[in-house]
Image: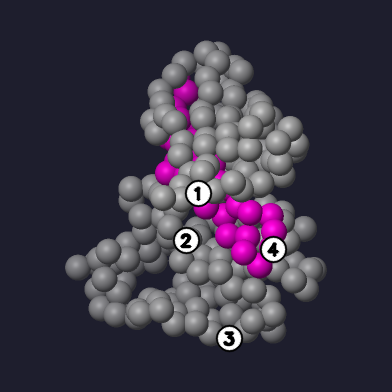
Amino acid sequence: AQKVTQAQTEISVVEKEDVTLDCVYETRDTTYYLFWYKQPPSGELVFLIRRNSFDEQNEISGRYSWNFQKSTSSFNFTITASQVVDSAVYFCALKIGNEKLTFGTGTRLTIIP
Amino acid sequence: EAQVTQNPRYLITVTGKKLTVTCSQNMNHEYMSWYRQDPGLGLRQIYYSMNVEVTDKGDVPEGYKVSRKEKRNFPLILESPSPNQTSLYFCASSSLYPATLNEQFFGPGTRLTVL
């Protein structure tokens, strides 16, 4: 069975600080997909990134970056120079083939102005 | 615009009063799914459907029903709602093939309160 662990329940940082959200996953499959979603206070789920298991390249998109390490089964998400608009709940999720998304319990990030 | 729509967005009801939350997608996706989100538990799958007339249970199906009579629609039915079904519900859809393009598109969510 698949499992996603987001050990950080809540994080607060002062604006402009960097912050890393941790995600550890468990699966016996060799082909899988990892996702990050953002849920702002308005409640919708905003897709941020998808990563295939066979592509360990790290990715950077503006102030966001993702570090995928198969050796430690981790897919961590870093926000550089955080802004108040980054305040949200962030979910990491795992998908095997066409099966369901298995979500972590989420990390609530608060950026303090 | 490609999207998943849900209605209603907010609903307050009483125990035992049957209700239906509708979900519709305009992307011709084969796969549709319902999740519920509860504090500290993340999102958990309720039911899913791989195609018309094909539905199956997810992790938390008790107290829910679904149907898939048309490809675009996947309603969630609560025959006799109870307070423990108070939650935020999301519908999602995705294409099954190819698997490399299997991003799930989520609806805006339905916040349900059962008194």
B99 in the magenta segment:
yes
Question: Are labels 1 and 4 assigned to the same chain?
Answer: yes
Q: Is residue B30 above or below residue A92?
A: above
Label 1: chain?
A: B
B82 in the magenta segment:
no
- Residue B38 in sight from this viewpoint: no
Q: Nearer the viewer, mark 4 or mark 3?
A: 4
Q: Amino acid at mark 1?
A: Phe
Circle 4 Cα neighbour tier, 10 Å, few/some/many (<14 / 14–19 / ≥20)? some
Q: Quadrant of residue B18?
A: top right
Question: Are labels 3 and 2 assigned to the same chain?
Answer: yes
Q: Amino acid at mark 4?
A: Ala
Observer-nearest residue: A93 or A55? A55
What is the number of the mark on residue B29? Answer: none
Secondary structure at badge 4 equals helix
- Which segment is the magenta one? B86-115
Compute the Cα span from label 1 to label 3. 26 Å
Q: Position of residue A60 (x, y in %)?
A: 44, 82
What is the number of the mark on residue A57? Answer: 3
Q: Given contact means CB atoms under 8 Å apart, are the residues at marks 2 and 1 in contact?
A: yes
Badge 2 is on which residue? A47
Q: Is residue A46 above or below residue A67?
A: above
Badge 1 is on which residue? B106
